[in-house]
Structure formats: C-alpha cells, structure tokens
Image (cartoon, rainbow, N blue to C red):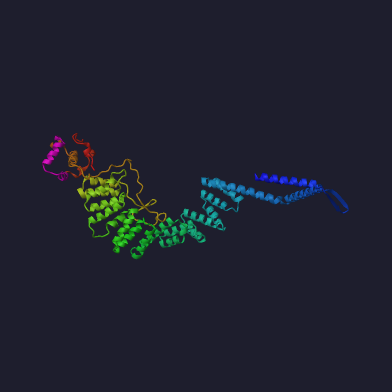
Amino acid sequence: MLRVLFFLIVLIALALGLAWLIDRPGEVTLSWQGYRIETSFLVGLGILLAMVAALVMIWNILRLTFRFPPAMSVANRARRRERGYAALSRGIVAVGTGDARLAGKAAAEVQRLLPNEPLALLLRAEAAQLTGDHRAVEAAFKEMTRTERTRLLGLRGLHAHAHRRGELELAHHFASTAHDIAALPWSAAAVLERHVTAKDWQSALAVLENNGNLIDRTTRDRQRAVLTTALALGKEQTAPDDALRLARSAIKRAPDLVPAVALTARLLIRKGGARKAAKLIETAWRLAPHPELAKLYLDLRPGDSSADRLARARILAKLSPRDPESRIALASAAITACDYKSAREAMLPMIEGDARPSVRVCLLMAEIEEAEHGETGYARDWLARASRAPRDACWIAGGVMSEQWLPASPVTGKLDAFVWRRPDERTSVGGEPEEAIFRPIAAPAEATLLIEKTQTMAIAPPGPEAQAGPETALASHSATGEGAADWEEKASPGAVAPPVATNDPVPEQSDPEALRPLL
C-alpha cells in the first residue's frame, strides 16, 4: 500500500514538473568549432538523456565482455560444488544404510569435486570402515590431523578406530593428545576410563576434578563418590582415619552409595562409635536397603543378646517395611531369638505373592522349619525349592555378577557400572510357577490331627482304626493320651509329604480342604 502511494506521488511530481517546463519554454544554443546549434529546452534535455543512456549501455557491454571468462569460471565452480554436495549427501545416506559400494563411489566423487572439503575425508573414512579397509580408515583420519580445523576430528576418529580394534594403548595416546589440545567431553571420558582401567583412582579423581564442567553435576558427584570410596577402601587397613574421612565425603555426594555407608559404619564401630554408625545405617536404609548394612546394624555390639538384635531388626523393618531385605533381616533375627512366629509372619508376604521365592527366602524357610520342628519334610521341600529358585540380588555390571562391590566393571572398565539387583530369571522348562510350601502358623488342632492321620494312612497299610473311619481313629488316638507332638514323632520323616504325591486314594471321609497346608 505504501509503495503504491509513493509511486503515485512520484508520478504526480513528474507530471507537475513537466507541465511547469511546458509553460516556461526556452531555447538552448550550442556553439562549438564554428557550428551553432539552437533548439528548445525540452528537446535538448531529451538529447542529453539519450546520450547518457547510450553511454551506460556501452559501458555495460564492455564490462560484460571483460568479465565473461571469470563469470564462466565462477559458474563452473558453483556447479562442481553443487554436484559435490549432492554426492556427499548420497554418500552419507549410503553410510547410514550400510551400502558400502554406493558409499565408496560417492566418496570418490566427492574427493574429486570437493578436494578441500573436510567432510569428504570423513565420508572416505566411513566408507572404508564399511568395507573393512583399516589402512584407508587410518590414512583418512591421519590426513585430517594435518589440518588445523580438522585435527580434533581426526584424533577422535583414530581413537575410536583403535578402540574398536582393541589397541587400548594407541587409543589412549590419541585421546590424551586431543585432550591436551582442547578438553572435550569424549577426550576427558577416555582419559578417565584409562585411569579407571589401570585402577589409578587418584589420577582418575584428578581428571574428574579438572574437567568437572564437561559433565553434568549429578553424574560428576556420583563418580566422585565412587572414586573416593575406592580410595577409602584401599586405605581401610593402613590409614583408617583417612579412609573414614574419604568415606564420609563420598556419602555427602551420594547418600545411597552402600559401600561408602558400610565402610563408614565399620570404621565407626571399630572406634567405638556404635551410636553414630546406627544413625548412619538407619538413614541409608531408607534409600538403599542392603544385606551388608543389615548385618552391620544387627551386630553393632558383639555382646548384645538375640532379643536386642531382634529389636534392632524391627527398627529396620519400620524404616522400610515393604522392602524384602527388611523382612529377611527381621526373619533372621527372629530365628536367632527363637521367635518363629514372628519369623513366619515376616516371610509370609514373600511366599504368598505371585513372584517366586528366591534362594535366600527358601533357605530361611527351611531354617525356620528345621529350628522349630526338626528335620521334617517341609524343611526338605524348602531346600529342594532353593536348588531351583531364582537367584538373589547381587552386584551386576552388564553380564558380570559379583558378591562384592567394585568401583568399575572388570570387563569394560566403565566407572560405577555395578548395580545391586536380581539377575534376570530364566523361564523354567515347565513354565509354571511352583506353589508355596510352608507350615501353618496357627492351625486348628482338629485339622492338624486329620492331616497327620491322612499322611500316615498314605504311607502305611490301613489298620483297624483307619478302616473304622477318621472319627474313630481320632477318638482312639485321643484315648491313648498322646498329643500332636507325640503323633508326629512316631511318623516317619517322609510322612510329611502331602497325600496328593502318593498313589493311594484319599479316604472319602476326609475333607479335601483340610489336607492343604493352612495359614
């Protein structure tokens, strides 16, 4: 809109100017070398404008004539550049799709059309990697190192190539060279990994401190805590005071780091600070329950009674009531204190759930059965379950499992790789989970006698009492004055198996529901 308005204003101004000139006619006289030219002002103005236009046209023609060869050269270079970048795009796509033939062809074309393009060398190296030509890969990356703007790119390519081939010393050399030129995240990580692989925790911590701005704060604090814990573990026996200081520093950065908490608690207990150790473990238990922490907490004072250990186990259970480690710690302490009812109640949620009980759970249930009732069929059943139960949690780093925590993976050298978790469970042959087998916590006396009687009938030929029916058998058994415990002692150890496992039929007078283990 403004342009149209401006055009109209200019047009009106020209019309007014032309009208003003027409109203004021004049003459122009030119005398030169005896010639005299007379004309009107408007005609002279028109001739002057025509001469100016002719001169401009002649100048443009001469300019185009002299600039034609350079212009053609520029156009040719532009076309070559356009073709080169098109080939570069095809080559990158071919590398991404794994087409080695097309990538090599595109790399050769890009090298011919764009000889000074850094991406041409990169494409050539990637195409050589697809074909497995290691010499060509090294030649391309080494050529990059000769140029200032591509030196770091070449060093990183050489580092990655050497690392893939397993030449760790050479890879470390390239990473250190690049790190000296410019501290980058990949070079700092490579140098740190090298020190971690060599178990040089002090040098690794120095690299982390000097290049902390290249890593996010959460990861940096966690890695510092891990390295500090590694240093503290190395000084636990030789310099316990330094180890305690380092372990406390690690806990400040990572309160859920179990090895640091356990080390600090051990050192405090040795120095007589059992109360401080207890508070430290209670704080860490809410974040990361662990068997090592439970053992230290229950054994704070060697002279404590089993009741004291059970009381401390109840404290852990209150701090993290739903965690399996709390229930296992409580059950273990209850077994030691001969409180089998509390032990069963603690293990009950871990048995009746959908998940299969682990090895530790099965062994604890067998220990409860054997401690309370002796070596019975229930205890043997739980021991058999333990032989094929899922494994318990342990320190896992990739495919490596360890009973003890390590600062780095012994295979990959990755720092803080170990995680406390249960190994992946393999599906059994049958594919069906096993039913929980456990002794009833409190069953009615009638149901207990009926189960025992039925089990005895399943393994022995029927006597007069069995032929008379279960009621007569129970009455006869009561008449002898024998209790349930006496009846169980007379039964053989194999009589505790459920009657379903035998081929003998169940008497019709028996209640099928009463034959199952009761809660």
Where residue 421 sits: x, y (%)? 35, 50
Residue drawn where x is 16% and y is 45% of the image:
485
70 to the left or right of 158: right
Kindly indicate the quadrant of the structure image that contains residue 284. Answer: bottom left
Q: Quadrant of the N terminus?
A: top right
Asked if the stretch drawn in magenta spans residue 471, the answer is yes
Residue drawn where x is 79% and y is 47% of the image:
21
Asked if 481 appears above or below 413 in the picture, the reply is: above
476 to the left or right of 334: left
Q: Which residues are magenta?
A: 467-490
Question: In terms of depth relative to the viewer, which is nearer, 154 or 311?
Answer: 311
Where residue 114 sits: x, y (%)? 60, 51
Q: How many marks?
A: 0
Where residue 86 sits: x, y (%)? 59, 46
Asked if the stretch drawn in magenta spans residue 183, the answer is no
478 to the left or right of 353: left
Asked if 272 appears above or below 362 in the picture, the reply is: below
Q: Is residue 460 visible?
A: yes
Furthest residue to the top?
Answer: 508
Furthest residue to the left?
Answer: 480
Question: In terms of depth relative to the viewer, which is nearer, 52 or 174?
Answer: 52
